[in-house]
Amino acid sequence: MSSSGRVSIFPTGHVCPADKRDLALKYAKGEILAFIDDDAYPAKDWLKCAIEDFEDNSVAAVGGPSVTPFNDSLRQQASGAIYSSYLVSGNFIYRYIPGKKREADDLPSCNFLVRKSVMQDLGGFNTSFWPGEDTKLCLDITKKLKKKIIYDPKVLVYHHRRPVFTPHLKQIANYALHRGYFVKKYPETSFKVSYFIPSLFLLGLLFGGALSLFCIPLKMVYSSALFFYLYLVFIFSISKELRLIPLVFSGIISSHIAYGLLFLKGLLSKKLKEEL
């Protein structure tokens, strides 16, 4: 352990993020545990805004948006724009762009504050999943303890993105793999139609294209649908920063394909590597 003023550092060695965060139960002295990633930093009033939400005793945890910093590189900005696109995140874009204050059932741990007493009741994250440790914790809070999780747009952090394309797509694929698996393991929050859409798109792209080779009417329908999809992606890729447009355009398409493929893999998996 090392300490400097009011900040103490506790080395953990090579353990999963959930185990690292569980150390807060052992060392933290406050009533609220605040979690943030090592590639993120909080807005000025992050803690102050969150504490206001905890004045309601029925609130167990609070989270908010993770916004792409303005000083990120062009390829990081492209990744942020992809995540912030309705075509990629759908109804979950409030995780990347501040939205309305609401109750939530699943928020990411890169911006998450929770009562220490709640974590003690649950025994911590109690999982080796990563990503996905936050999904399990949120499910335990809302289903086991019957307590509230609040999304507050003022509880904001800035989260550096992984640049397009390879680092970004690896992250997308990892998210998709776990979400597909969680459809079976944690269906209460993961069995949602929106999570299936990229896989349905991918299957339609492959099988629709193959079948259209043998049926002219189907080929016309397939070509029209594909054109409309590409047109829609282009519209959602338009930016004042012209250099972002081709990166976001190709990034949205490749994100759909990567997510769709790895979601199916997770859905069909008997176990993930964390459980072996």
Image (tube, helix red, strand yellow):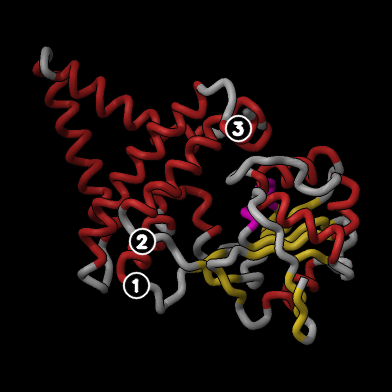
Magenta span has 106? yes
Q: Which residue is drawn at 50% across and 29% down?
A: 266
> Can residue 63 be spotted in the picture?
no
Query: Within the magenta stretch, is there residue 75?
Result: no
Q: In this view, does 276 lie to the left or right of 214?
A: right
Taking depth in this image into account, of 95 and 124 the one nearest to the observer is: 124
Q: Mark 3 points at which residue?
A: 182
Q: Give the range drawn in magenta.
A: 104-109
How much space separates mark 3 and mark 1, taking CA atoms?
Answer: 33 Å
Residue at 52%, 67% in the rendered image: 159
Point out the frontmost of discs 3 and 1: 1
* Contact check, label 1 and label 2, Cβ < 8 Å: yes
Q: How far apart are marks 3 and 2 (CA)?
A: 26 Å
Q: Mark 1 is on which residue type?
A: Ser
Taking the view exactly as shown, the residue that stands out farthest to the bottom is 5
Residue underneath mark 2: 163
Residue indicated by mark 1: 73
Residue 63 horizontal/vertical position (percent): 68, 61
Q: Residues within 10 Å of mark 3 (few under 14, many from 20)?
A: many
Q: Which residue is pictured at 59% across the width and 25% down the height?
A: 271
The kind of residue tagged 2 is: Pro
Where residue 202 appears, as percent x and y from the top left, is 32, 30
